[in-house]
Image (cartoon, rainbow, N blue to C red):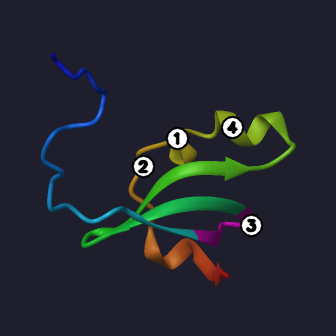
Amino acid sequence: MAYYSILPIYMPDEQAPEYEMLDYNGLQVLACKTENGYILDRIYSSNPSDFLIDTLQPGTLLQNNLINKIIR
């Protein structure tokens, strides 16, 4: 009998990505920490114009000088 699953048979040895909440340029964002810096994943804002800013698109590498603090 065949067993079908969406999970891989052998799990990769990769670690889960490490996410952190940041205050970036006055906005709260969720970013993934990598060896090159932080990559933007999500913006927390109720202002629709914040989502139209080109430098705040998901997948963008964030500039370290604009990170005000790390929110725990």
Sequence-wise, the earlier of marks 4 and 2 is 4
Label 2 – label 3 distance at C-alpha: 17 Å
Quarter of the picture holding the C terminus: bottom right
Q: Mark 3 points at which residue?
A: 26
Q: In this view, does 9 lie to the left or right of 72?
A: left
Label 4 – label 3 distance at C-alpha: 14 Å
In the rendered image, the vertical position of residue 65 relative to residue 8, given as above or below: below
Which of these two is toward me, 61 or 16?
A: 16
Q: Mark 2 points at which residue?
A: 60
Label 4 – label 2 distance at C-alpha: 13 Å
Cβ atoms under marks 4 and 1 closer than 8 Å: no
Category of crowding for the residue at label 1, using alpha-carbon neighbours closer than 10 angstroms: few (below 14), some (14–19), many (at least 20): some
Label 4 – label 1 distance at C-alpha: 7 Å
User: What's under tag 4, amino acid-wise?
Assistant: Phe
The image quarter containing residue 26 is bottom right
In the rendered image, the vertical position of residue 51 relative to residue 64, given as above or below: above
Q: Mark 4 points at which residue?
A: 51
The image quarter containing residue 68 is bottom right
Magenta residues, start to end: 21-27
Q: Residue 46: which disc?
A: none
Q: Residue 57: which disc?
A: 1
Sequence-wise, the earlier of marks 4 and 3 is 3
Category of crowding for the residue at label 3, using alpha-carbon neighbours closer than 10 angstroms: few (below 14), some (14–19), many (at least 20): few
Cβ atoms under marks 1 and 3 closer than 8 Å: no
Cβ atoms under marks 1 and 2 closer than 8 Å: yes
Label 1 – label 2 distance at C-alpha: 6 Å
For image coordinates 68% across by 37% down, the residue present is 51
Sequence-wise, the earlier of marks 4 and 1 is 4
Q: Is residue 13 left or right of residue 22?
A: left
Q: Say what secondary structure mark 3 lies in.
A: loop
